[in-house]
């Protein structure tokens, strides 16, 4: 904890709050029928993306998931371009061609959210190989869920990363559910980090709702990777506030368990911490909240006022010239 | 010009491009010291230290990592030992590599080559003999190349590596040992240009890969019987040189498409559909496909011979049009 | 409701019948019981009555086609009625060789009635449309009797393509498509290509022999002069030669033949084609039954055919059915003899060159005679040298005594 400064914690707070407000707004817009397609929300897991990405630069790569809004915001994505993409507008990150599940910006090192569970794992390995090959000290981070660690991609990716000693950090967001299926029903181990043993790489399990813990752990792993010491697996225990997707009421969740986890909300925890450490007062936090809400509202206005893509461009960008 | 085999020509194509561009590297199962299961990469491991990488038997990771490496600035050339193994890594190809650029609004590029040998006639049975090029041609965002000669193999390899898109470079096991004259040094054949391997006036035979040679043999036989066949080698299936096909059919008014793949939903059907749609009035006879049978490739050589297209079947198909 | 006219059984032993003649044209009104066509069997010629009142909507079976009992010959219905579900004429055709004696088209799927497609390749359809050709008159030689490009080209080459005055002359000389510094490019297409293909075909299939001879035309010229002093329509040398050729053909059945597929057709009638140069190429209208027509009939017919040929107004039926062709280029005064190409599937052609006053020896004296150059080309596959020479000799005899041809 000692390394985390007040400024950093406040930055984390702003990032996490931006994610939360973005997701709450997306939920509201979706429920109102104003968003096309479907959305998977990151609320409750903000500390993971925020804590990990705090140690990354634009030269570093991440691969994200279908629940990717949080990773993108934490990696520097702009909420207006993201919201425009959710609205399928031409001003969105993907010009309205990708949508919620495919937001990407290679310039920011974001190799995409991904609609296929586990698909980002080998891609992150490839990006890490590029970093190693180009000797540019950059790393890549692969975000994925507990259920994605059951995919073959996970095993092939970890194994290859291990034998090639690649600068990649596998960050498992264990939110306890593979869609509706409880972790205890979809794997026979408690900690996904145990799987690292099979590949001869370090694996740890941490509290994914404690942004400072995530930050510290990820920072170490990233640092090892930058030094050429190979990949790591970090399992962050966390909880998904919403259902798998909007429209899923999450009735398979244990009510009591949900209550308990809501009490451990990473943002609440961070607010408490800021206050206990006397880093921020209620009024300051309220000010931040209002400021961020303003950004999100502005993003929605930007998205709604943006034009749709031209049908004339429907064939563009299938192939690079 | 230098005489070399198809396999050597592929290697030469890769070698020249690796000399040209430090970001080109090779990865795959046993491609390093061992030189590849068919010896295509032999010698490159020593020639390009650190740039020819053996991988675990992990097709998913091989193709998947190539997607990430390509998106991050490299030009991977990965080998999948047999095209039959592509089923193991299809998501990496068709949902990731193929769609990235479009889904990301044109911002990403994925310059990667997947080299893989196809084809039957070697009693290699059902999981090591297939021609599944139609899987890839069915996916927008991927280019598909199937060279039939050593010179084409080299020129198209260079073009594949220089291309900023995912390219399926499909070799044919029957052709690896075939030798021919190949230009030395840098040699690039643009993608999307078919090649008329034999000019003729009476019927167009469209073929690619190994089947080009079957078509040529059939054409020689037909010539003796007064039918002058034109053999169009597509070389690249995507992008497709429709103009060349249509121009040939405009000349001959008859079309036979030869495809080693199984018949149903094969690329031969695609060619037929295009010619009917865009060249209907050029046709003086129905379009006929000569393809493999709709069965898994049998092991027994006699059965496999029945399964595969051959000169006799091509000749019969051509004659049915007159 | 359309009514089919089918080949009736006319006698115990009858298997097939041959269409001798249609007495009604498509579009003619008919009353039930009207005689509408004549059919020949091996024994006799019979007539077929209209099975219903209405309009002859479609002639399916062409003259000279040999068809089995039950085969569809034509359709009668209401004017403008779309004919549907007509059963194929050919389905009953037995596979036995003799039945397919005349043409390959016995697979009658190719001759169709509205509602059932003519079997024709897309290219053949396009060519036919461009040249305003009606498929029902074309015999398909492709697989399964399909009409293919060459069938249409051969058909076109036999005559002008246009059947309707109002139709645009798409078969004419294609417009230049490209201007170059030293030349223009014109597509080799339309009638030019049709003529060309026909010539190539004939050249490639027929081992052709050419005979050349000059003969004294003074008797013929004198006769013409006499006739023309009286006649309303002035007759030409061509008119007279057509008559003479027709009479000679009537006397030489072994010349009045054609090689079609695997059979030699020995024509019972004499129809002489006359080559007519038109701006877009060449057409060969046919003077039917020239052997039994008078010279003035022939003359009127050739004038009419030539005029209409130059206006592209000939009906396709007027360019079909020739059994021999005469091509006269004497008017150009530039050629004595040439080697005309046979108008396939006919077996011979007579080329007529210029007439030149020439000193010849007659009865031991040199006299000046108007000598005409004649060139006979014949297909050695079906006509041998001796009968051809004999035929040419007969022509010479008739030219010297032309009145014999008129008797």
Image (spheres, rainbow, N blue to C red):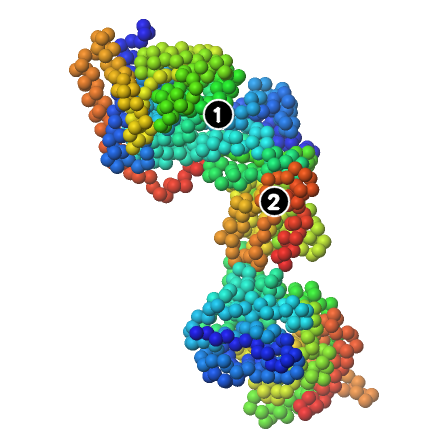
Q: C150 or B91: nearer the eye?
A: B91
Left or right: residue B71 compared with residue A260? right
Q: Farthest residue in the top direction?
A: A2
Q: Position of residue C269 (x, y in %)?
A: 65, 81
Q: Which residue is mark 1?
A: A152
Residue A121 image-quadrant placement? top left
Q: Which mark is residue C39?
A: none
Q: Is residue B212 visible?
A: no
Q: Considering only vertical position in the picture, is C46 above or below A255?
A: below
Q: Give the Cα separation between the discs numbered 2 and 1.
A: 33 Å
Q: Chain of mark 1?
A: A
Inspect this view and state whether residue B124 appears.
yes
Question: Which residue occupies 32% across, 30% down?
Answer: A245
* Left or right of residue B13, residue B273 in this image: left
From the viewer's side, name the closer residue of C161 and C95.
Answer: C95
Q: Which residue is mark 2?
A: B292
**Residue C120: percent from left, percent from top:** 55, 63
Q: Residue at x 37, y 26 (%)?
A: A181
Q: Is residue A72 above or below residue C393?
A: above
Q: Place residue C305 in its image quadrant.
A: bottom right
Local secondary structure at mark 2? strand
* Label 2: how many Cα within 10 Å (few below 14, some 14–19, many 20+): many
Disc 1 element = helix
């Amino acid at each position: 904890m000692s390394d985390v400064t007040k400024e950093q914690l406040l930055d984390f707070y702003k990032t996490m709050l931006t994610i939360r407000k973005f997701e709450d707004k997306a939920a509201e817009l979706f429920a109102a029928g104003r968003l096309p397609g479907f959305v998977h929300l990151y609320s409750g897991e903000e500390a993971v993306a925020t804590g990990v990405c705090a140690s990354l630069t634009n030269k570093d790569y991440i691969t994200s998931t279908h629940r990717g809004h949080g990773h993108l915001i934490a990696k520097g994505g702009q909420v207006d371009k993201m919201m425009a993409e959710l609205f399928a507008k031409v001003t969105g990150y993907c010009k309205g061609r990708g949508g919620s599940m495919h937001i990407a910006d290679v310039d920011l090192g974001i190799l995409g959210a991904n609609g296929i569970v586990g698909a980002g794992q080998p891609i992150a390995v490839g990006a890490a190989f590029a970093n190693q090959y180009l000797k540019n000290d950059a790393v890549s981070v692969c975000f994925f869920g507990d259920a994605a660690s059951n995919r073959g991609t996970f095993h092939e990716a970890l194994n290859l990363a291990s034998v090639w000693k690649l600068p990649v950090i596998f960050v498992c967001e264990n939110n306890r559910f593979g869609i509706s299926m409880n972790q205890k029903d979809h794997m026979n181990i408690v900690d996904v980090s145990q799987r690292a043993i099979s590949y001869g790489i370090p694996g740890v399990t941490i509290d994914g709702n404690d942004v400072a813990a995530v930050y510290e752990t990820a920072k170490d792993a990233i640092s090892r990777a930058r030094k050429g010491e190979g990949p790591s697996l970090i399992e962050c225990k966390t909880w998904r506030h919403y259902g798998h997707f909007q429209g899923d009421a999450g009735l398979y969740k244990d009510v009591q368990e949900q209550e308990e986890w809501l009490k451990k909300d990473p943002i609440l925890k961070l607010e408490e911490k800021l206050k206990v450490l006397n880093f921020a007062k209620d009024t300051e936090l309220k000010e931040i909240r209002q400021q961020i809400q303003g950004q999100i509202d502005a993003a929605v206005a930007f998205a709604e006022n943006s034009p749709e893509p031209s049908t004339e461009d429907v064939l563009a960008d299938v192939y690079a010239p | 010009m230098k005489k070399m085999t198809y396999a050597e020509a592929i290697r030469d194509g890769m070698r020249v491009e690796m000399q040209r561009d430090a970001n080109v590297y090779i990865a795959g199962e046993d491609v390093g010291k061992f030189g590849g299961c068919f010896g295509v990469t032999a010698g490159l491991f020593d020639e390009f230290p650190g740039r020819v990488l053996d991988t675990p038997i992990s097709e998913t990771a091989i193709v998947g990592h190539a997607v990430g490496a390509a998106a991050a600035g490299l030009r991977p050339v990965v080998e999948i030992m047999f095209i039959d193994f592509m089923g193991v890594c299809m998501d990496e190809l068709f949902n990731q590599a193929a769609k990235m650029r479009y889904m990301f609004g044109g911002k990403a590029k994925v310059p990667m080559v997947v080299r893989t040998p196809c084809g039957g006639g070697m009693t290699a049975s059902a999981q090591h003999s297939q021609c599944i090029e139609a899987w890839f041609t069915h996916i927008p965002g991927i280019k598909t190349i199937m060279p039939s000669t050593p010179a084409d193999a080299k020129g198209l390899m260079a073009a594949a590596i220089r291309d900023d898109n995912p390219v399926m470079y499909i070799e044919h096991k029957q052709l690896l040992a075939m030798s021919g004259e190949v230009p030395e040094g840098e040699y690039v054949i643009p993608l999307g240009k078919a090649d008329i391997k034999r000019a003729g006036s009476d019927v167009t035979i469209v073929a690619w890969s190994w089947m080009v040679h079957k078509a040529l043999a059939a054409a020689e036989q037909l010539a003796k019987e007064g039918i002058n066949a034109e053999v169009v080698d597509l070389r690249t299936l995507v992008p497709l040189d429709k103009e060349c096909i249509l121009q040939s059919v405009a000349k001959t008014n008859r079309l036979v498409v030869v495809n080693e793949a199984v018949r149903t939903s094969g690329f031969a059907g695609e060619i037929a559909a295009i010619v009917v749609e865009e060249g209907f009035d050029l046709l003086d006879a129905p379009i006929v496909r000569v393809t493999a049978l709709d069965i898994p490739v049998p092991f027994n050589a006699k059965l496999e011979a029945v399964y595969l297209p051959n000169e006799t079947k091509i000749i019969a198909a051509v004659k049915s049009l007159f | 409701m359309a009514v089919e006219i089918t080949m009736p059984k006319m006698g115990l032993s009858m298997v097939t019948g041959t269409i001798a003649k249609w007495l009604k044209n498509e579009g003619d009104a008919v009353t039930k019981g009207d005689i509408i066509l004549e059919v020949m069997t091996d024994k006799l010629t019979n007539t077929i009555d209209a099975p219903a009142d209405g309009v002859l909507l479609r002639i399916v079976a062409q003259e000279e086609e040999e068809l089995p009992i039950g085969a569809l010959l034509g359709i009668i219905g209401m004017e403008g009625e779309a004919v549907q579900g007509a059963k194929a004429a050919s389905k009953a055709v037995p596979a036995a060789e003799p039945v397919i004696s005349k043409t390959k088209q016995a697979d009658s799927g190719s001759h169709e009635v509205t509602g059932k497609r003519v079997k024709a390749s897309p290219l053949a359809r396009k060519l036919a449309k461009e040249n305003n050709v009606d498929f029902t008159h074309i015999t398909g030689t492709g697989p399964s009797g399909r009409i293919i490009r060459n069938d249409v080209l051969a058909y076109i080459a036999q005559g002008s393509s246009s059947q309707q005055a109002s139709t645009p002359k798409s078969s004419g000389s294609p417009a230049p498509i490209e201007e170059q510094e030293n030349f223009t490019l014109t597509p080799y297409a339309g009638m030019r290509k049709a003529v060309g293909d026909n010539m190539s075909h004939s050249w490639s299939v027929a081992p052709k022999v050419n005979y050349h001879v000059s003969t004294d035309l003074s008797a013929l010229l004198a006769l013409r002069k006499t006739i023309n002093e009286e006649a309303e329509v002035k007759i030409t040398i061509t008119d007279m030669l057509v008559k003479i050729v027709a009479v000679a053909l009537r006397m030489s059945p072994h010349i009045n033949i054609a090689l079609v597929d695997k059979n030699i057709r020995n024509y019972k009638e004499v129809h002489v084609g006359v080559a007519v140069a038109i701006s877009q190429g060449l057409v060969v209208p046919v003077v039917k039954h020239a052997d039994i027509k008078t010279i003035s009939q022939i003359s009127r017919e050739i004038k009419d055919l030539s005029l209409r040929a130059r206006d592209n107004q000939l009906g396709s039926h007027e360019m079909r059915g020739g059994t021999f062709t005469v091509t006269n280029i004497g008017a150009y005064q530039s050629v004595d003899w040439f080697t005309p190409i046979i108008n396939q599937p006919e077996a011979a052609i007579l080329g007529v060159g210029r007439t030149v006053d020439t000193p010849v020896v007659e009865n031991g004296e040199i006299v000046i005679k108007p000598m005409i150059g004649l060139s006979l080309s014949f297909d050695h596959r079906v006509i041998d040298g001796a009968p051809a020479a004999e035929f040419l000799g007969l022509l010479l005899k008739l030219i010297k005594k032309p009145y014999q041809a008129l008797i």
